Image (spheres, rainbow, N blue to C red):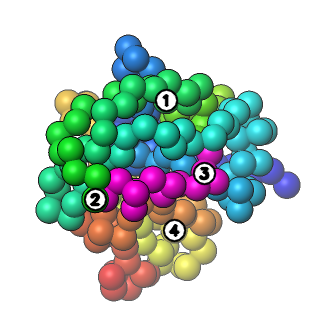
Amino acid sequence: PALKVLVLEARSRIGGRTYTYPSNAGPIDLGATWVWPHHRRLLGLAKRVGVATCPQYEDGGSVYERAQGSISVFRVSLYKSPCVFVMLQCADSSTQHNTHLQGQSMGADRFEGGAQSLCDGLQSTMSEDTIRTDTAVKSVSVLEDSTGLRVVTAASEGEEGGAEELSAKVVVIAVPPRIIARNIEVADSKGQA
C-alpha cells in the first residue's frame, strides 16, 4: 500500500539546510554539497528524479575556515565546471595549508545545478498538497489512547488564523537535535518530554 505523506517545512522553500544560491555566475551550494560513491541510495534518488552528477573540481585555490570563523584563501583561481562556478580571491598567500586542503573531496561528485536541484527534483514527483512550506512544527506528542501522534504547527508570521493540529501514525523529524531542543516540544501521552 502507498504511504500518505505530508512534509511540513518551516522555511519558505524546500530543502532545509540544502540550499543552492542562484548567482549570475552559476549555482553556488551553501549547504549540502558533495555525494560519494558509497551513497548509493542518494545517487539512486538523483537518477530517479533526473539530476545528474559531475566530479568535484579540485584544481585551483582552496578556502579554509577556522573554528573561530576566520577564513583564509590560498591561491587565486577562477574556474568553471558543469556543477559550480567559483572565484577565489587571494587573502592569504601562505601555502602551508594548501597541500593539506587539496584533495579533501577525493572521489566526491556534486549535483549539476547544485544540491537544491535534488530537492526540487524530488518535489516534482509529489502532488502539490504533499508539501507545506512556512509551516513550523511546535510540538509532537503521543495521543492519549497511544494510537498515533499529535503534531501541532504554528501559524506563519503575518498569516491569519492560529495553530493547526494534525495526527499521524509516524513522524520523522529531519532537523538537527539542537533545533528540535530549541523549537519543538516532544512529549509522551503523559506530557513527559
SS for tag 2?
Answer: loop
Give the amino acid type for the residue marked by disc 2 in the picture: Gln
Which circle, 3 or 2, is nearer the viewer? 2
Total number of numbered labels? Answer: 4
Residue 33 image point, x, y percent = 49, 46
Q: Are marks 3 and 2 in contact (CB under 8 Å)?
A: no
Instruction: Find the magenta span and give its range.
Output: 97-109
For the residues labelled 1 and 2, the Cα–Cα distance comes to: 26 Å
The answer to whether residue 173 is magenta is no
For the residues labelled 4 and 3, the Cα–Cα distance comes to: 39 Å
Which circle, 1 or 2, is nearer the viewer? 2
Residue at image position (31%, 33%) is 76
- The label on residue 108 is 3
Between disc 1 and disc 2, whose residue precedes? 1
Label 2 packing within 10 angstroms: few (<14), some (14-19), many (20+): few
For the residues labelled 3 and 2, the Cα–Cα distance comes to: 24 Å
- The label on residue 96 is 2
Residue 144 image point, x, y percent = 47, 78
Q: Nearer the viewer, residue 147 or 126?
A: 126
Q: Which residue is mark 1?
A: 84
Give the amino acid type for the residue marked by disc 3 in the picture: Ala
Residue 27 image point, x, y percent = 45, 26
Which circle, 4 or 1, is nearer the viewer? 1
Q: Which residue is mark 4?
A: 149
Residue 48 in which image quadrant: top right
